[in-house]
Amino acid sequence: MQQYLDLCRRIVNEGQWVDNARTGKRCLTVINADLQYDVANNQFPLITTRKSYWKAAIAEFLGYIRGYDNAADFRRLGTKTWDANANENAAWLANPHRKGEDDMGRVYGVQGRSWRKPDGSHLDQLRKIVNNLSRGIDDRGEILTFYNPGEFDLGCLRPCMHTHTFSLLGDTLYLTSYQRSCDVPLGLNFNQIQVFTFLALMAQITGKKPGQAFHKIINAHIYEDQLALMRDVQLQREPFPSPQLEINPDIKTLEDLETWVTMDDFKVTGYQCHEAIKYPFSV
């Protein structure tokens, strides 16, 4: 929690204003931020200085694991995070590749589970990683990337948290996640939950011990219509201790994650928080 607050204060105190063409808003911006999450000791990085809707964050990443490309599928899992980008993004609405209501195109999990090769076949990046790690193999390329420049025009949004690299030392699994752009008041709350949970899940289904998760952000920003709420409200609150995440131990394989797992298989204990803050969301 402290590293999150430190980043927020750094942006408020040291950030520079940058115009954002996509949203038409200014962002107070810093370059390069490094966060670390202690998955080994289950210190779940849930924001405590405002209420965090953690189930939606995990549901979103479960949708990525399943390769979903439709906002309706994400809603059925328990998150509405893709409704706006699928249905309110002007550039995507005018895109001839859009298939209709709720279509997201070839973004995030589609690339991770079905990367299109030049010969027309598809590559399942995640399956290769799970297979290798389950056998104790780390070829220094256990990399899952959602970033496919050749297909940016086929999706509603370029991926923000775009690449996840797994590393194995003995029987301990580590994760390094890379993010090109981060809306810190809103997005980071989701992103750090997802990085932590992804390592915890991958360790569980590959039979490894979870270690540390490392999260690198390139462009960390606060939108101009979020600044007052962050500076005058959230940063004035004292954080509570970190809660813990409980994952159903019956989740043992990638197939389990693809088929029957729901948000009922996740539980957070020891969560204390301040009241919610309604930050504006920029499409």
Image (cartoon, rainbow, N blue to C red):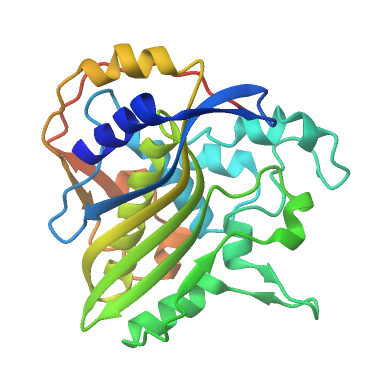
User: Where does residue 173 sit, x and y in percent of width and height?
Assistant: 27, 72
Quadrant of residue 164 in the image?
Answer: bottom left
Q: Quadrant of the C terminus?
A: top right
Q: Identify the residue at image location x=15%, y=40%.
A: 243
From the viewer's perspective, tell me whether residue 124 is left or right of residue 137.
right
Most extreme residue toward the right is 96
Whether 240 is drawn above or below 209: the answer is above
The answer to whether residue 277 of the structure is visible from this angle is no
Quadrant of residue 239 in the image?
Answer: top left
Q: Quadrant of the N terminus?
A: top left
User: Where does residue 101 sit, x and y in percent of width and height?
Assistant: 75, 35
Q: Identify the residue at image location x=70%, y=42%.
A: 156
User: Where does residue 98 sit, x and y in percent of width and height?
Assistant: 81, 43
Whether 92 is drawn above or below 250: the answer is above
The answer to whether residue 51 of the structure is visible from this angle is yes
From the viewer's perspective, tell me whether residue 91 is left or right of residue 207.
right
Whether 243 is drawn above or below 161: the answer is above
User: Where does residue 111 sit, x and y in percent of width and height?
Assistant: 63, 62
Q: Identify the residue at image location x=45%, y=52%.
A: 62
Whether 278 is drawn above or below 46: the answer is above
Q: Identify the residue at image location x=59%, y=50%.
A: 159
